[in-house]
Structures are given as C-alpha cells and as structure tokens.
Image (cartoon, rainbow, N blue to C red):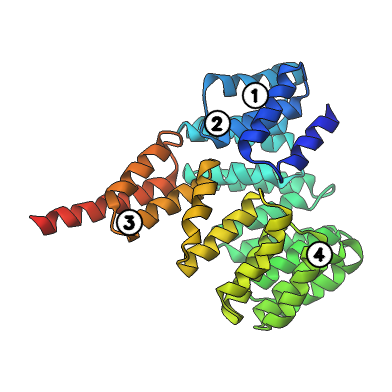
Amino acid sequence: ARLARLTHEWASELEAPPERRARLEVALAEGSSDPGLTLLLAHELLELGDTSARVRRLVRGVLDAHGARGPAYMLRAKIAHERGELDDSLAFARAATCLEPTHDAAARTYFLTAYVSRRADEALAFLRRRASRWLPRSGEPSVMLVDALTALRRYGDAEAVLDEALDARPDDAPLALAAADWCLSTGRSERSEALRERARDGVSAAQLAGCRAKLHASRGDGESALAAYAQVLAAEPLDIAAHAEVVRLLSLSEGLTAAEQHLAPFLERFPRHVGLRELRARVARRQDSPAVDEALAELAEDGNRWALAEQARLHIERGSPAEAVTSCDAALARWPNDATILVVRSDAESVLGDATATLR
C-alpha cells in the first residue's frame, strides 16, 4: 500500500488530474485500505470543488479506521472552509496542528484560517505555547510563529522569538538557515550571512545555494543569483519558488523571452507539473502572447482556480465583461467562497455597470 501511495505521488507530477483520480479510484475499488491513498483521493476531489457527502465520508472513514491523523483533520478543515463553515474549519485545523506538533503545514493552515476569521490573537497565543513546548525537540514551531508574527508586521516580536530559538538550539542548522532567510527578507543582510555560515555543515548544498541566491538578488547581483539558482534547480528541478525567482530575474535582465526559454526544458521533462505550467502561463500573460489562451485553457480544464480567474480577467480586458461574469459564475458553482474569483466577478459587474450608465 505504501508503494502504491508513493507511486501515485510520483505520478502526480506527470499525469493530468483526471488520470490521477482514475488511478486512485481503481486502487480503492480493488480493496486498498491504505489511509494515504484514501486521503489523496479526497484531496483530489476537493481540488475540484467537491465537498459532497462522499468526500466527507472518505475522510471520516480514515479517522474511524485508523484513529486521529493530522492530514485527515487538515482535509476536514479545508472542506469546512470551502463550505464557508469557518468555526468548524478553525477547530479542525487546530486539531491537525496538535497532531502534527513539529511540522508547520497544519499550523500554517490553522493560522491562516484564524486570520480570516479575525481570531489572529487567539492563534498567536496557541502558536506561542506550541513553540515553547516543542523548542527542546524542534525549531519548526518557532519558525512558524515567526512567520505568523511577520505576517502581522510584528517584526520586533518575531526577532525575539528567533533569538530565543537560536540560543536554545545552537546546532540546529535548518533553524539557522530559516533565520538567515528571515533576516535577509527584513533587511538584515550581515546577520543573514553569519547565520548562513552557521548552518553550512548541517544543510544540503542546494539549500545553501538558495540562501546565497537570495542574498545576491537582494544586493542587485542578478548574474550571481542566477548562477546560484542554477545549482538549486540542478538538485531540485521542481523547486517552483526557485523557478519563479529565475523567471523574475531573467524578465528584468534579458526579457520575457529568456524567461520562457528557461522554463522550456523543465516543461519538456515535467509536462503535467502544475507549478511549471502556471509559470509558463504567467509569462505568456505578461507577453500578451496568443499562447496565453491555450496555456490558461489547459490549466482551467484541470480545475486550476488561478487560471479560471485569469481567463475571466482576460474577458474584462478584451471588452467582454458579460463573458467574465459567466466564467466566474461557472467557477463559483464549484468554489462558492473563493475570494479571488469573487473579486474578479465584482470587477466585471462594475464594468458592466459603467457600460450601462454610458449607454443611458
């Protein structure tokens, strides 16, 4: 069962979503009771906007058969969020965070849910207790707390948390590297360099190269930054954050065509990878290239929300706000609480209102 799950996760980079879902449906129909495969199918269906009783039943079945599991509660939180049930979403996300005490994915979901529910202070108090409790074991909860404080622009508090964690865990190289990134993002480049040196012997060469690339970019040395990102991508060819930075730097220095050329060989290797396809569509969008329609259509066919929103924006820009409203309504039928699509629909309605007033 574990091999089947790993096979699906690997294939997810190469297959279209319908093929992935079919693979999972077959595995479960053949009697697989692996909770990981069940949750993967529930996640695939949720990405399509499916919050039906079947999806909820899949997740509950994992909890009933296998006990409390962080990923299952995270999915329940996402399902509740899609249905507009923010209180339930927050409760499930907090449960997931408790079950995944040293990993920040659940905690990040919990904080974001609390933030949109206007309960950020409550979430911060919980994350502080979590960071303090688990500091002897891991620096990740402290890094998550720093991210939350930074999102609220409480930079002094964030730095104090980092200092405490670094003092308590002097040999934690991933923590030092995360601190180096944070210092660089807040303009403390000298301290960032010192922390990167502190982390040198405990993290991979690709991780160090990524930190070095950010430092070069912050100093305006795009050529050195690109060279460092090339080292990152040689080791991690699907690091989308690194690709995005390369695209940004090439767009500034050599133009959008160079950015497009950078992506081409990676898309040839991983033609179904959503992150790479989104980046290609973003470049085409900025070029105002005819290829943008095809790129967005391919993503939209797979249920990509960003692509659906961009298609609607294109309708507005091309003078067809009514088509934009229609596109948004089709997307909102699947994701009724998607903020981006709601905003685009509002923009299209505003244009229609202006056009009506002009005609009158």
Element assignment for label 1: helix
Residue 296 is left or right of residue 186, and the answer is left
* Among numbered discs 3 and 1, the one appearing first in the sequence: 1
Q: Quadrant of the N terminus?
A: top right
* Measured Cα–Cα span from mark 3 to mark 1: 39 Å
Q: Which residue is mark 4?
A: 234
Residue drawn at 49 percent across, 35 percent down: 82
Amino acid at dot 2: Ile
Which residue is more in the foreground, 307 or 118? 307
Amino acid at dot 3: Ile
* Among numbered discs 1 and 4, the one appearing first in the sequence: 1
Q: Residues within 10 Å of mark 1 (few under 14, many from 20)?
A: many
* Among numbered discs 2 and 3, the one appearing first in the sequence: 2
* Measured Cα–Cα span from mark 3 to mark 4: 40 Å
**CB under 8 Å between callouts 4 and 2?**
no
Q: Residues within 10 Å of mark 2 (few under 14, many from 20)?
A: many
* Among numbered discs 2 and 1, the one appearing first in the sequence: 1
* Measured Cα–Cα span from mark 2 to mark 3: 31 Å
In the image, residue 262 lies at what x, y percent?
Answer: 67, 68
* Measured Cα–Cα span from mark 1 to mark 4: 37 Å
Q: Which mark is residue 237?
A: none
Element assignment for label 2: helix
Amino acid at dot 4: Ala
Amino acid at dot 1: Val
Q: Which mark is residue 59?
A: 1
Q: Residues within 10 Å of mark 3 (few under 14, many from 20)?
A: many
Element assignment for label 3: helix
Residue 228 is left or right of residue 41, and the answer is right
* Measured Cα–Cα span from mark 2 to mark 1: 10 Å
* Measured Cα–Cα span from mark 4 to mark 2: 37 Å
